[in-house]
Amino acid sequence: MKTLLIEVPEELQTLVEQQAIARGYADVNAYVQDLLQADLVHTPLDEEYDEQFEQMLVEGVKGPHRPWTKETMAEIRQRGLARLEELKK
């Protein structure tokens, strides 16, 4: 693994350390690594996906009501996880 050195103001370092602890990370490195990975999954290159997602949300709001069942939630979760795997590639 490579090392990335960054300089941050003392206040930001303190805040990052507090967040890492509060969120259950082993250390600041793990927390910052997670933040970077999350940011890389959603980049400006995903503009087309963002537009499609927004359009689907609007259509969903305007569409007929569909009850929230365990099956519906499982389907949504499965599609979300599949999309996440696609983005990781």
Image (cartoon, grey):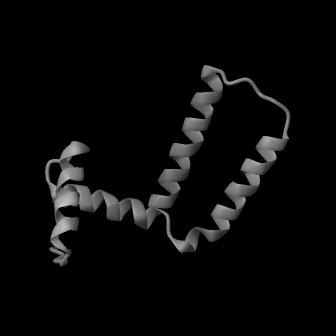
Q: Describe residue 1's horizontal placement relative to residue 88 as left or right.
A: left
| Observer-nearest of 24 and 1 | 24
What is the residue that sits farthest to the front in this orientation? 11
Q: Position of residue 9 (x, y in %)?
A: 19, 74
State the image quarter where residue 73 is shown: top right
Q: Quadrant of the N terminus?
A: bottom left
State the image quarter where residue 88 is shown: bottom left
| Observer-nearest of 73 and 25 | 25
Where 42 sits versus 22, above or below? below
Q: Describe residue 49's horizontal placement relative to residue 60 as left or right.
A: left
Q: Position of residue 23 (x, y in %)?
A: 26, 44
Q: Position of residue 13 (x, y in %)?
A: 18, 65
Q: Residue at x 54, y 47 (%)?
A: 82
Where 12 sits versus 74, above or below? below
Q: Residue at x 16, y 60 (%)?
A: 14
Q: Describe residue 84's horizontal placement relative to residue 65 as left or right.
A: left
| Observer-nearest of 88 and 3 | 3
| Observer-nearest of 63 and 75 | 63
Q: Describe residue 17's horizontal placement relative to residue 39 as left or right.
A: left
Q: Residue at x 63, y 23 (%)?
A: 71
Q: Residue at x 61, y 36 (%)?
A: 76
